[in-house]
Amino acid sequence: GQQLNQSPQSMFIQEGEDVSMNCTSSSIFNTWLWYKQDPGEGPVLLIALYKAGELTSNGRLTAQFGITRKDSFLNISASIPSDVGIYFCAGLGGSSNTGKLIFGQGTTLQVKP
Amino acid sequence: NAGVMQNPRHLVRRRGQEARLRCSPMKGHSHVYWYRQLPEEGLKFMVYLQKENIIDESGMPKERFSAEFPKEGPSILRIQQVVRGDSAAYFCASSPPTSGYNEQFFGPGTRLTVL
């Protein structure tokens, strides 16, 4: 079945640093979504990408839909303590176009003040 | 402007009992999805429903699990005769009919513990 490989698995950075994480797949996706999950809560949608090559920003967050439709990255600029959490990429569509989101394993981000 | 609501937030069951998880989608949303998350893992798709219809249940275990989204009322995920391996966080998501299933908004989840 479809799988997403998300990296890095965890990051420990200093406040103010930029962060980059990415997801790759052997399958094509029609939509890429990036979520953030805080402990004990559900994932919160950060950015949605719909077209290959699309670059979208949401405040300090920037995400891109890879041109091959098999990858996506998320950048966080000037990190702050509240950026702490688990970030998930999720892909939708491709061969299984039924609303089934495929999630990456997550990137745990820790920010040192 | 309430988001996706799930209850209960925490549920404890003994082996062999039934677990019933409820999800109320965001106002105006007619698509509901259920996902399961084991500790330290990403979410795994279980089932996709529209009002009174199951669209895709490819992620549902063949036995003991069922889901419904009736014309009136919340969506229900039912787990019969629970076992310890069912312990997980169960998340519901919803999306509006106009965007199809591209943007799924998640509820806070139900944490099921099976003793």
Image: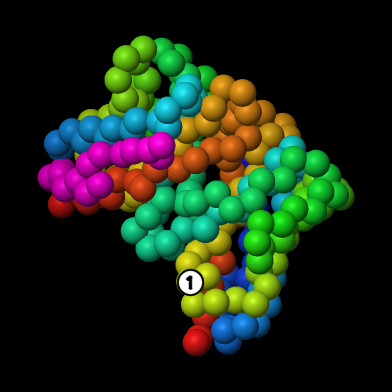
Q: Residue at x 35, y 21 (%)?
A: B68
Q: What element carries label 1?
A: helix
Q: Residue at x 48, y 26 (%)?
A: B29
Above or below: residue A89 compared with residue B99: below
B75 relative to B84 in the view: left or right:
right
Q: Position of residue B10 (x, y in %)?
A: 22, 49
* Residue indicated by mark 1: A82
Q: Where is residue A54 in the image (x, y as percent from the top left)?
A: 81, 49
Q: Residue at x 36, y 48 (%)?
A: B108
Asked whether B39 or A83 is in front, the reply is: A83
Q: State yes or no: residue B3 in magenta.
A: yes
Q: Name which residue type carries label 1.
A: Ser
Q: State yes or no: residue A39 in magenta.
A: no
Q: Where does the magenta region start and end?
A: B1-15
A81 relative to A5 in the view: left or right:
left
Question: Which quadrant would the N terminus of chain B be assigned to in this image?
Answer: top left
Above or below: residue B32 compared with residue A110: above
